[in-house]
Amino acid sequence: MQNNIDNHKHQKTKMILKILGPILLLIGLASVIIGIVDMGLNITGSNEPKLFFLMMLGFPLIAIGLFITIIGNMQKINSYVVREQVPTTNETLNNLASSIGNVANTVRENVEQKKCPNCGKLNDINAKYCNNCGKPLVKICPNCNKENGTDATYCNNCGTRL
Ligand SMILES: [Zn+2]
Ligand SMILES: [Zn+2]
């Protein structure tokens, strides 16, 4: 609830900035033009230009207006870029995730099952004997009694030749 209010406030501020920027820019430009015109009209006359201060006021207003306008447009560009890229990124991530998932499943199937060297039947990873032909699926190290794969030449625990 609090977040929604904050978000709303933030959007309102952005809207104000977007409107305020061009308005300040226009006021600044108008002030400078009025100042220059006033100066031009009075330069030949005896009167001192009274609206010269408008020109001095106008330049900072143009600068501020331009700055706010750029910020407003940058936010628009940013939000546009984010809105455009997020679905694409999500899709890519989803595809990547499912690809990784598929690979992981394939790896898990191969890793978590043990192929019997005698008959080729896939057995549970923890199986010690094939449930199809009854042949041993592990080599027990004569030195440390550790279980090794049937294709192991050396014990992976103590290095004894099997
Ligand atoms: Zn077997
Ligand atoms: Zn061993």
Image (tube, rainbow, N blue to C red):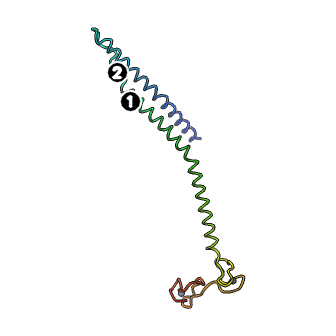
Observer-nearest residue: 159 or 4?
Answer: 159
Question: Mark 2 is on which residue type?
Answer: Met
Q: Which residue is label 2 attached to?
A: 55
Residue 129 lies, in percent from the top left, at: 67, 84
Q: Toward which corner of the image does residue 111 lie, by quadrant? A: bottom right
Which residue is at 54% across, 88% downward? Answer: 144
Mark toward the start of the polypeptide (1 vs 2):
2
Question: Mark 1 is on which residue type?
Answer: Ala
Which residue is at 58% across, 51% downward? Answer: 90
Tell me the CA gap for discs 1 and 2.
Answer: 13 Å
Residue 41 lies, in percent from the top left, at: 33, 12
Quadrant (top left/top right/bottom left/bottom right) for the N terminus:
top right
Disc 1, SS: helix
Mark 1 burial class by Cα count in 10 Å: few <14, some 14-19, many 20+: some
Marker count (numbered)? 2
**Which mark, residue 8?**
none
Q: Is residue 119 left or right of residue 8?
A: right
Which residue is at 62% across, 84% downward? Answer: 138
Say above or below: 128 vs 35: below
Residue 118 lies, in percent from the top left, at: 67, 85
Q: Toward which corner of the image does residue 33 lie, by quadrant? A: top left
Q: Which residue is label 1 attached to?
A: 63
Say above or below: 129 vs 88: below
